[in-house]
Amino acid sequence: MPFSKLKLTWSFALLALPASSQQVPAGTISVELLRYPISNETRRMLQKAVQASETGDHSGAAKQLRHILIKSPGADAYVYSLLGVEYLKTGQITEAVDALQQAVALLPHDAANHANLGLALACKGQYDRAEPELARALELDRHNKVASQLLSSLPLTATK
C-alpha cells in the first residue's frame, strides 16, 4: 500500500480537551494529556486549526498551530501531534519528522504519535528509524491500522 493512502490519526478528541478550569471524564483523552491542562481560549484555537484541516486548508491549519505554540506554550503536547500531521498532509516531511519527534517526546505512550512519526520517517526513506516507531505504536495499540499497514509495507532491508 502506498504511504500516501494511509489515514493519519490524531491521538485525542478535541471536543474533550481538558481545560484548566474543568475535569474531563477519564478515558476520553490520553492520560498523559491530563498533565497538560489548557485554557478555553487555547482549546478554541486548537478547534479552529482542526476545522481548517477538515476543510482542506492544511496550510492554514499549520499556521494556526504555529501561532498556538507562540501564544500558548503549555499546549505543546497537543500542538506538535496535530502540526506533524498537517506537515505530512502538505508534503513537508522534514518538518513533520521534527514536530512528531517533539510529540513523541511529550507523549511517549501515545500510539498515534509513534505511528505518524514512523510514517514520516518512511516517507523520508529512513526505514531503519521508521520500523521501531511503528513497532512501538503496535505495542501501545495493537489495532493501530497505520502502524500495522506501514510496518508490513516497509522494504525487507528495514527489518534486518
Image (spheres, rainbow, N blue to C red):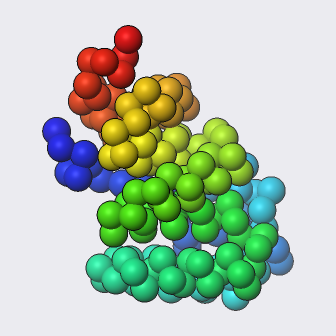
Q: Where is residue 39 shown, x and y percent of the image? A: 76, 80
Residue 42 position by quadrant: bottom right
Residue 91 position by quadrant: bottom left
Q: Where is residue 124 shown, x and y percent of the image? A: 36, 45
Q: Is residue 30 among the parts visible in the rendering?
A: no
* Residue at the spot 64% in from the left edge and 39% down from the top edge: 109
* Residue at the spot 70% in from the left edge and 88% down from the top edge: 41
* Residue at the spot 33% in from the left edge and 46% down from the top edge: 123
In the displayed structure, does residue 159 sit left or right of residue 135?
left
Residue farthest to the top, as pictured: 160
Q: Nearer the viewer, residue 31 or 105?
A: 105
Residue farthest to the left, as pictured: 1
Number of labelled discs? 0
Q: Is residue 62 above or below residue 131?
A: below
Q: Is residue 135 among the parts visible in the rendering?
A: yes
Q: Nearer the viewer, residue 74 or 140?
A: 74
* Residue at the spot 81% in from the left edge and 74% down from the top edge: 20
